[in-house]
Amino acid sequence: MSKITNRRVAVTGIGIVSPLGLDAASTWQSLMAGNSGMGSIAQFDASNFPVHFAAEVKNYTPRVHRTGKHHRFTMPFTQFALDAATEAMDDAGVFPSTISDAARFGLVTGSGMMTGDFDHLTRFQRLVQPSDDKPLDWALMQQKGDAFYELNDFGKTASNSGLSLLIQEFGITGYANAVHTACASGGQALGLALDVIRRGEADYMLAGGFDSMINPLGVSSFCLLGALSSDNDRPTEASRPFDGTRNGFVLGEGAAFLVLESLEGAKARGANIYAELAGHGNSLSAYRITDSHPGGDGAIQAIEGALKDAGLEPTDIDYINAHGTSTKMNDLSETNAIKAVLGEHAYQIPVSSTKSQTGHLIAAAGALEAVLSVLAIQHAMVPMTQNQTTKDPECDLDYVPEGPREKAVGAVLSNSFGFGGSNSCLLFKHPEFDERCA
């Protein structure tokens, strides 16, 4: 393993497909306007489910139309990844084909639980295995399989299918990896990409996440876990992070990608630098498969790790883009973790959850919120926490309930805490942060 160096890393390209917009600019504008991405599920008939609303990508037509063998393995949310990644690459203005060595360009994706048509596959299994006490009939599977299952379906459900698509699309020949750590996937993908550049294994990295679990299996699973808000009569108010009446998150979908490159190289080529990705912290608390530790254990380690990695003090943080799912335990745990690490400074800075408007994009959440954190730095605007109207005495920080707030933002902490206890924290700095602090 190559040694981690002090090589600094810049963000030079961003791209989004989200419930609020089909690109980065429209998503940010919609966020600032106070719009909500929530509504009745249109992708399938969920009227008999306990929850029949979500935060879907709306009016979506793929911007990038490609043909070729590898595109047979795309699923709808893999197409989200292609569009968001293409926007980020175009925004950065650098491609493997334009640099002297394409192997210096790498890719890390945060991907979710790739879900094919499981109802379809279940019917097929019952055809070839009528009862559990009988073995699968291989001959019958070969005979009738074509009517139920195509080989392409196997490729579509692989966790690295999106990674492969993007490699093929952009001609990336350098470092490549796919991360699947539930809701922390997008954040950890960016942290891994940061380290790859620091180690000198790449000069440029495309990194982000994509996901959709808005399907019968995904919605029913989260319903059984009791994780989703069931406020079917008021979907736009259902996601209310840190609110005293919060009762679950709203499932979302989409993709977000960032182009990272060495800060020195970005300056040399005159690139537009949105921010510096200065540090990341990871931990695995494994308290419960779904709940975070009430005291913030795990999250505390990740936040402290990000600060140490970036060489910053708690008082350097100007804004926290919270994981803020709108579940009872997560919001309390995150609040306690922030207070444990930042002390009194926690009460002096805004802490908001953009999931109140976008929903929870699962594996794509950390990547989307990383882009929104970068845009908060660029625009000197802090997003609000929508629907936070009833005080919770245990969640007592400044959650920006009144609306977006003008504020000069020098350093942003972006939190992502996933099922199973995976925790990821990213620290972004304003491109002129060091000059301002000098």
Image (cartoon, grey):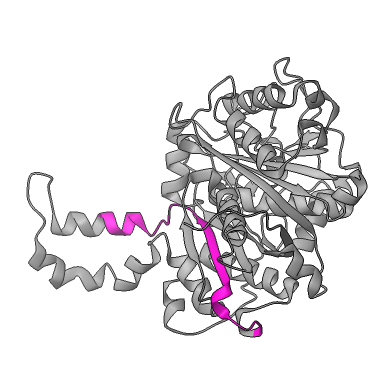
The correct choice, above or below, for 55 with respect to 267 in the image is above
107 in magenta: yes
Quadrant where the C terminus is found in the figure: top right
Q: Residue furthest top?
A: 393
Front one among 225 and 320: 320
Relative to 420, 82 lies left or right: right
Report which quarter residue 270 is drawn in. bottom right
Residue range corresponding to the magenta coloring = 98-122
Q: Percent position (x, y) of residue 237?
A: 71, 36
Can residue 325 be seen in the rendering of this structure?
no
Residue appearing at x 57%, y 65% in the figure:
81
Residue 95, above or below 253 = below
Q: Residue 294 versus residue 284: which sits nearer the camera?
A: 284
Q: Position of residue 175 (x, y in %)?
A: 50, 67
Q: Is residue 342 visible?
A: yes
Residue 220 picture location, percent across and down: 43, 42
**In the displayed structure image, the side of residue 141 where residue 10 appears, left or right:** right
| 419 sits left or right of 88 in the view | left
Q: Residue 236, how many percent across, how many down?
A: 71, 41
Residue drawn at (59%, 19%), measured in percent from left and top?
295
